[in-house]
Amino acid sequence: MTMKSILAATVLLAAHFAFADGTGSKTAPSSQPTVPQAPVETLVTVNAKGNDVRDVLTSLFTQDKASFVVDPNVHYVLWLSLNKVDFDAALGIICHLANLKATEDGGIWYVKQKPFVNEHPQPKLPPLTNHDLAKYVTLKMHKSSLAEVLAKLTGETGVPITIDKSVPSFRLDAHLYRKSLKYALIVITKATHLSYKLDGPQVLVYKPVPPNPVHIVGG
């Protein structure tokens, strides 16, 4: 091999190493796997001092650049301060306070009012008996409405007395000393041409319906 051939081979070999170590335009493929990036967490800040929940939701979804729809019957006053809180956590807190339900469908959030549930329902009262009407009352009322007189009887005995909507307005004098509730009801309903009856857990004062006239046709 001549000296000229040796120099040419050396140049080619040097060019090959330069191409392999990155000085050229082609590099060997990397053996490191590509790691997917985690989604960016949206942090929001919401402050409300007696603001309506609709305004609070508008601020919340605007910061997240999210589309949303709120039912027109949603109303609630909020007092809260959330500073740099995760969007989902903030939305959950607001929905919990205002009794709302938020669902996402097709990239749009829909906020609706959940039905309110009475956590402490009133216990059912037992039906009244004549024994409840034996309680004593004392009245001294002048030109008082019928509703006021019956409310006074309820206050003294604890027996609920309801006036039927068919009863007209009355004003009367009521003077009774240590009389039974039954006696008081008889006197008051007789003076006003009304009637009363035990109606489950209450006494119902009502206007009796006159009987239909009987027509006798002679033969």
Image: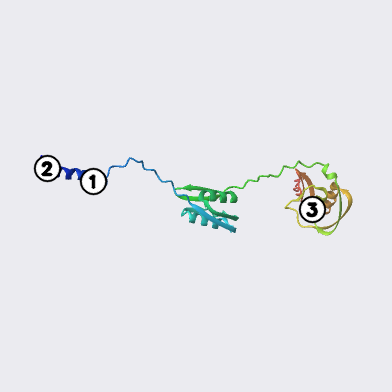
Residue labelled with disc 1:
18
Residue type at tag 1: Ala
Q: Residue at x 79, y 56 (%)?
A: 148
Q: Residue furthest bottom?
A: 143
Q: CA distance from mark 2 to mark 3?
A: 125 Å
Q: CA distance from mark 1 to mark 3?
A: 106 Å
Q: Which is nearer the eye, 152 or 86?
A: 86
Residue 112 point in image, percent of width and height: 54, 50
Decide if residue 75 is in sight here: no
Residue type at tag 2: Ser
Q: Quadrant of the N terminus?
A: top left
Residue 134 point in image, percent of width and height: 85, 44
Earlier-in-chain disc, 1 versus 3: 1
* Side (left or right) of 57 relative to 174: left
Circle on res. 145: none
Residue 136 point in image, percent of width and height: 87, 47
Earlier-in-chain disc, 1 versus 2: 2
Looking at the picture, the colour scheme in use is rainbow
Q: CA distance from mark 1 to mark 2?
A: 20 Å
Decide if residue 196 is in sight here: yes
Q: Nearer the viewer, mark 1 or mark 3?
A: 1
